[in-house]
Image (cartoon, helix red, strand yellow):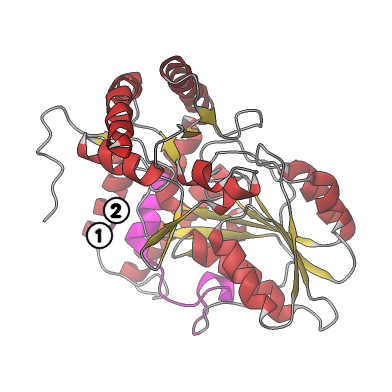
């Protein structure tokens, strides 16, 4: 059994974009839902009605965070399922002459691979490049919104760099063109204010554990009037948009996390921005040669992605882990081999710089002292890794 209690100083967790530690409100909501009973929300008896009340109350909290009507929220097993449900659901209902998908080249693999599966079915996918700071080429994106396009995809914020995309401009253009828009809001939810009046997305995909809720639950929002073929058949749950018995306890935790994130959104964004500035200043001071990826673009307040020359990102992550710090590379693992980030390569980084990148991401339980401990420990670790390379 793995335990984290053997470090007398306590570990510093700086990987919130991978998963954010469960908020106390979410933990209590899950516990209470499990203790309350064992009703199925589809059952009409008292136990079933009690379970359904938990689900619907949580649906209202998630809807409030996202700025949509509660009826628009479809609970899923997470962000990847939400994305797959939107992409395949639109494709399965698309006329035979409407078989194009538009997306940036820096989308999450959940989007890239789902669209890749459509290409195997004969769909055409247009991948729009980005600039050196990771922002999609808006002019080329808008020009790609042609007839016969079934779906446009756009990430609200990149999980590796935190770079925020022009979702408002693209959303308005898609609405004018009559093209459905899927916005991957997995990283943005709970970190930026969401208003469907300014970001007219037809679908939003979100995930509970990115904002301090439990893993294994997420949501897809579906704009009223949009036809969507269900990904999972077999029941009338979720207004026939997703079959299967809802995960009541997980949904309860999701709702509690959404409520906590919404209530603290404005103050928390300002606090995280101060932490980001603090870390970036310390990095520049200790490593004048550091490269901060996406720094000139609008970014999430909680994300710093950097490369230090002559230091491999995977080795730095391992060394930091042994020293008590949890961060990540932002790279994908394929067949056991670490590949350079497709996002950083698309931004113009060379292979060495992309492989050297490390992502630090913080959240609701990150303190300034955590940032300082990390920044103070980093120089000695980097120096040791550089010495080992020379040997």
On the rendered image, what quadrant is the C terminus found in?
Answer: top left
Q: Does residue 22 lie above or below 276 as drawn?
A: below
- Which segment did they paint magenta? 234-257
Place residue 12 in its image quadrant.
Answer: top left
User: Does residue 216 belong to the magenta stretch?
Assistant: no
Q: With 210 as the anchor, is 98 left or right in this view?
A: right
Residues at discs 1 and 2 in contact (Cβ within 8 Å): yes
Circle on res. 34? 1
Q: With 390 as the anchor, is 190 left or right in this view?
A: right
Front-most of 303 and 382?
382
Residue at 50% from the left image edge and 63% from the top image edge: 80
Q: With 337 as the anchor, is 175 left or right in this view?
A: right
Circle on res. 378? none
What crowding class fits label 1: few (fewer than 14 Cα within 10 Å), some (14-19), or many (20 or more)? some
Q: Position of residue 108 (x, y in %)?
A: 56, 56
Q: Residue furthest top?
A: 285
Instruction: State whether residue 228 appears in this view.
Output: no
Q: Which residue is mark 2?
A: 30
Q: Does residue 35 lie above or below 305 as drawn?
A: below
Front-most of 207 and 264?
207
Q: How far apart are labels 1 and 2 at the CA level?
A: 6 Å
Q: Position of residue 70 (x, y in %)?
A: 58, 55
Front-most of 229 and 312?
312
Residue at 37% from the left image edge and 54% from the top image edge: 252
Residue at 34% from the left image edge and 22% from the top image edge: 375
Q: Position of residue 246 (x, y in %)?
A: 41, 68
User: Does residue 255 belong to the magenta stretch?
Assistant: yes
């Amino acid at each position: 059994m793995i335990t984290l209690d053997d470090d007398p100083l306590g570990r510093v967790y700086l990987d919130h974009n991978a998963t954010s530690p469960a908020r106390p409100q979410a933990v209590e909501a899950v516990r209470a839902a499990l203790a309350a009973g064992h009703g199925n929300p589809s059952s009409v008896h008292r136990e079933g009605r009690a379970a359904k009340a938990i689900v619907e109350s949580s649906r209202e909290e998630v809807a409030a965070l996202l700025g949509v009507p509660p009826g628009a929220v479809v609970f899923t097993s997470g962000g990847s399922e939400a994305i797959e449900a939107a992409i395949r659901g639109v494709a399965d209902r698309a006329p035979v002459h409407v078989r194009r998908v538009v997306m940036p080249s820096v989308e999450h693999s959940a989007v890239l691979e789902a669209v890749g599966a459509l290409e195997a079915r004969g769909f055409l996918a247009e991948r729009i490049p980005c600039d050196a700071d990771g922002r999609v080429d808006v002019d080329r994106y808008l020009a790609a919104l042609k007839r016969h396009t079934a779906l446009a995809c756009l990430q609200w914020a990149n999980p590796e760099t935190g770079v925020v995309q022009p979702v408002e401009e693209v959303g308005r253009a898609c609405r004018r063109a009559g093209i459905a828009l899927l916005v991957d809001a997995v990283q943005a939810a709970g970190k930026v204010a969401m208003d469907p009046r300014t970001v007219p997305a037809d679908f939003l995909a979100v995930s509970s554990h990115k904002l301090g809720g439990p893993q294994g639950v997420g949501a897809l929002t579906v704009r009223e009037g949009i036809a969507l073929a269900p990904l999972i058949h077999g029941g009338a749950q979720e207004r026939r948009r997703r079959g299967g018995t809802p995960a009541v306890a997980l949904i309860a935790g999701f709702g509690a996390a959404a409520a906590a994130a919404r209530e603290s959104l404005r103050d928390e964004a300002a606090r995280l921005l101060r932490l980001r500035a603090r870390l970036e200043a310390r990095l520049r001071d200790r490593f004048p040669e550091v490269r901060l990826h996406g720094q000139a673009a609008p970014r999430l307040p909680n994300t710093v992605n950097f490369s230090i020359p002559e230091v491999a990102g995977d080795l730095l992550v391992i060394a930091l882990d042994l020293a008590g710090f949890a961060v990540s590379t932002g790279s994908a693992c394929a067949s056991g081999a670490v590949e350079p980030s497709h996002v950083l390569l698309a931004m113009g980084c060379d292979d060495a710089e992309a492989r050297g990148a490390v992502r630090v991401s913080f959240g609701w339980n990150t303190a300034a002292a955590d940032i300082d401990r990390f920044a103070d420990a980093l120089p000695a670790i980097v120096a040791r890794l550089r010495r080992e390379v020379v040997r």
